Amino acid sequence: MTNKVAFKEAFNVIAGGVNSPVRAFASVGGEPCFIAQGKGAYIKDIEGNKYIDFVQSWGPLLFGHCDKDIVKACKKALKKGTSFGAPTLSESKLAKLVLENFPHLDKIRFVSSGTEATMSAIRLARGFTKREKILKFEGCYHGHSDSLLVSAGSGAATFNTPSSLGVLNEVAKQTLVARYNDIQSVKELFEKHGEEIACVIVEPIAGNMGLVLGEQEFLEELTRICKQNKALLIFDEVMSGFRASFLGSFGINKIEADIVTFGKVIGGGLPAAAFAARAEIMDILSPLGGVYQAGTLSGNPLAMAAGIVSISKAKKDKELYKRLARLAKMLTQGLSELAEERGVPFTSTFVGSMFGYFFTENPVKNYQDALKSDLKLFAKFHQNMLKQGIYLAPSQFETGFICDKMDEKMIIKTLEAARKSFKTL
Ligand SMILES: *Cc1c(COP(=O)(O)O)cnc(C)c1O
């Protein structure tokens, strides 16, 4: 079967043909590749085309597809039963593996998706502070729960309108939106609403407007403002956790947020995510306290097994993130040089195993900057790379991922393809 036929068939039975919108290739045109299987750095579609995969399931696969150790652990868990709805030892094991690295996090709770993790973190912050408003940043994505699905509109210092039908205005109104890397926009909102703000939620390394690094001073100031106003600071590390460095943003900036959310790598490619905080905060969760949160498949034994291997392997290999960063640097520097040779407006960045690029000359520090990227150039580049066997995220506002099964040869191959692609722009 061809991708085209497969998409047509899917379109008839699944809304939009996909179970998550960005998979539809809407912003780059054409139909999505239907994946038949993955191995290491590569995926193969149902037509038999093979690609170097820089999406890696949008982040979770730090060790690539079908990592032997993860597969082995999952097989072992599978044989013992896939779900019990009762505690298992694997949950405490993964909890310890995560918490032992963070002095500011005492307790954790596992859920099945990043959306659940951030949604629960927000409820927890509201319950803890007994305040209603939250503050987020334009261009940061924290999953699709109502409170977090509000568009920035004109950016800083405005109340927001929902960015989706079905989100109540009443709910969206409680979400304030500031500009990323712009502390003044935060100060203004706190001056107006300081005593009503339960929490600030931020991607300390933003990966959902393309890759945009949070500046150290901005994040430090944010911590200070939250403390001063008795609001909680939530670092959403669903993407950056165990990706930007072993300790995510904490490994880079050493800033201690009140609540941290994890996802993606923490489940090693199976559905797991989590939120963690100091005991005083976590202990107000049900059954100890009055903040309700639950999940039939939370802490699922298969997901825990994959997560345990994923995190243990990442911890054991002291050179892992250096190695991945070296490849990310080689790729982004190479791309920037090739673009410059051809006079294509381009800027790129990387942190650990994450990389990003925009078709604009100016540095990108916030969402407004990201919007200046030439989306037509991006779409053309993406299509051309895909034809040459390079699978990049099919949207300008996403991050790329290096996995442990990649090597310099693959980066060189990718850069050769990019040289040809830039020529067509
Ligand atoms: C992916 C992501 C989410 C949502 O996670 P899902 O598992 O897709 O629900 C939340 N926050 C950030 C920063 C993410 O990258």
Image (spheres, grey):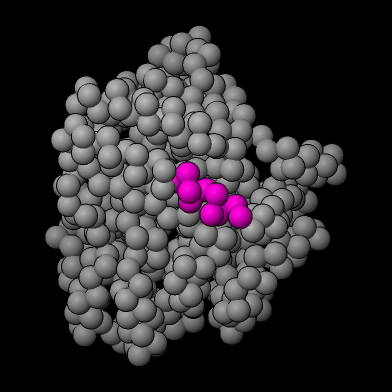
Asked whether 35 or 21 is in front, the reply is 35
Query: Looking at the image, which is closer to me, 367 or 332?
Result: 332
229 left or right, relative to 13: left
Image position, residue 235 (x, y; %): 45, 68
Say above or below: 229 vs 18.
Answer: below
- Along the line of sight, which residue is nearer the eye, 83 or 372? 372
Q: In which quadrant of the rendered view does residue 122 lie?
A: bottom left
Q: Which residue lies at the image location 23% right of the left edge and 80% below the top edge?
A: 187
Residue 61 % position (x, y): 57, 43
Picture residue at 14% right of the left edge, 60% below the top: 154
**Residue at figure coordinates x 64%, y 58% from the top left:** 318
Q: Main secondary structure of the magenta part?
A: helix
Residue 356 covered by magenta stretch:
no
- Quadrant containing the C terminus is top left
Question: In the image, which residues are magenta?
Answer: 319-328
Does 321 lie within the magenta span? yes
Q: Residue furthest right?
A: 80
User: Is residue 263 in sight in this rendering?
Assistant: no
- Look at 41% across and 48% down and name the residue there: 329
Rendered view: 310 above or below 180: above
Vertical order, 391 against 6 (above or below): below
Q: Which of the 4 image quarters holds residue 406?
A: top right
Query: Number of numbered discs present?
Result: 0
Q: Is residue 49 visible?
A: yes
Left or right of 327, for residue 133: left
Residue 27 higher or lower than 100, as above or below: above
| Extreme-top residue of the structure | 1
